[in-house]
Image (cartoon, rainbow, N blue to C red):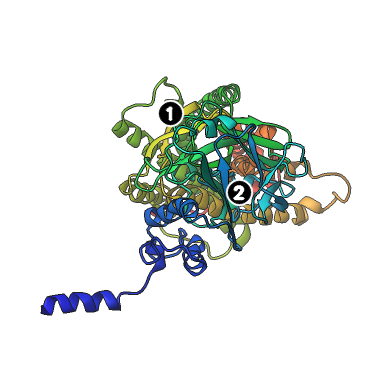
Amino acid sequence: MENSRKELKNKREQPRNVCLGLINEGQYDSFHLGNTAKCFSKCTQSNTEACDLENLQRYWLKFEDHLVESQSGIVNMSFLKAAVQNVSTNISEDLLFSLMPSQKLLGRNHIPREVFVFSASALAVSLPAGFILSSYSQVPRQMTEDEHDHPDRVRLPRSLFESLQGNRSEVWLAITILDIGPGNLFKGAQLSPEDSSHVLNNRLVGLSLGHIPVGPLVEPLEITFSHQHLPPNMTLSCVFWDVTKGSTGHWSSTGCSTELRAKKTICRCNHLTFFALLLRPILDQATVQALVRISRAGCGTSMIFLASTVILYAALRFYRRRFKSEDAPKIHVALSISLFLLNLAFFINVERDRVPLDTVCWIQGAIFHYFLLCTFTWMGLEAFHLYLVVIKVFNTYFGHYFLKLSLVGWGLPALIVIGTGSANSYGRYAIYDKMNGTTLQLCWFHEKTALSALYITVHGYFLVTFLFSAVVLGLVAWKIFTLPSATVGREQGLNWKGVLTVLGLSSLVGVTWWLAILTPLGLSTIYVFALFNSLQGVFIFCWFATLYFPSRGAMSSSSGTARVDQVHTTSHE
């Protein structure tokens, strides 16, 4: 008895967390709808508040059935528009319903959803400012074929209702438009960070006949979404919310087709369930193969020149004793080795017909991730070294300097990969075409990896090194072009030696990688990035050979600006 009282007391003391999806279960008055809708914004990656996505999603899925059973008529709330209508099963033509769109700029915080739920998803960083999509501000209503003012519409085939005539003479149809906000609800595994896609406008359009069983439709239903200025290398695909996939469900394209037009997309599906229109980045088979061939040729060439850089360094160490104590060439060679191994890992990743077993793919993904981070780290250390010898100049002595750099250059990526691997983040990664078919499979981050794993350890890491390197390179370039030796007697004309020096230093700090930021602009920038980035090893070799071969004295006499890389700290070991 005492234990029962304690349990009851504990339950009363527990906070009433609506986002666990139990408090408001089965309650659909305006208060409880609004209360539950707050979880759309609360249940995010950054919010620590406990959320049960499965319970919350089930709540909204059952809301469609509730509308039909209660014959609620019209629901008009800021986040929810719904209408329930009595429909005869003996109709003579297809039914059309207007979704009454109002034009709105695309944002991450808007979409369509359903029991016929249709939405769209997109790469946030890839969307141009002028991309316009439809949002929905009014309750859905029935319309005629002659009304052309409302391009966003739902068409339900006559055959759907005819198939129900044996059981009933009329049915209740519910149509809803739900704004699910920027959180995690109804996002699913299809919207993984690797896929870089999300539900369009965060709004779902839903259609439901309640608990009436409906088999595969003889004629598909249609939902039309209007939009403008589809970004390059992006595609729209119609999907539905499959509650049988995973613990919380996710989007699937089975039974749905997508018809893309200039300013609208038509979704046709052969079943009644939740649907969405996803906007996602794509690369077709021909484009992927062309990019792979360019990368193979460039990486193969780079590997030859990177190996030549290491061999040249070994030869110079043998013939020049003082060369052994200089740190700058050691840093260049460390970068060359990491880049060589990254290119080798890339070759192994793409040079096969099938993705290996899960364990092998996990290892390959971790290795590829490690050498990618090593490359980023050594490019950042190149920038750090430039900062010491060109910007700071004084008080730059460090005991065991290169040893400390090596611990950072090889050790820090290892710690990150170990942490990432412990979360089981590596696995199969697929690139899809417009028909949602696989064009390329790699061993990389698993398609269901958490948002933080990829964005922090790759995108975030790259962003940090990029910002630091860009600032240092900008300061170095400013110093080069403002040095008295570079400006005296050069009031007119361009300082070509200074330009070449900046270009050489750019290859060391990874300017070719910076082109990745421009890839959302279109396919041409993707080709430019693939070409120049795969040739980074060639640029490094040219810079290294120009500096140290055949003699440093010759280089010093031929280029006053080359002295930037010839001021070195010395290891004291």
| Type of amino acid at the residue the image marks with label 2 | Ala
- Measuring from the top left, give residue 468's x and y in whole percent: 58, 56
SS under mark 2: helix
Determine the residue located farthest toward the left in the rendered image: 1
Question: Can the viewer see residue 326 in this picture?
Answer: no
Label 1 packing within 10 angstroms: few (<14), some (14-19), many (20+): some
> At 45% across and 29% down in the image, what residue appears?
441
Q: Which residue is mark 2?
A: 124
Q: Which mark is residue 402?
A: none
- Give the mark toward the camera: 2 or 1: 2
Residue 436, horizontal then vertical, whole percent: 52, 30
Above or below 345: residue 51: below
Camera-nearest residue between 12 and 154:
154
Residue position for label 1: 349
* Residue 23, image x, y percentages: 37, 67
Q: Nearer the viewer, residue 436 or 87?
A: 87
Q: CA distance from mark 2 to mark 1?
A: 28 Å
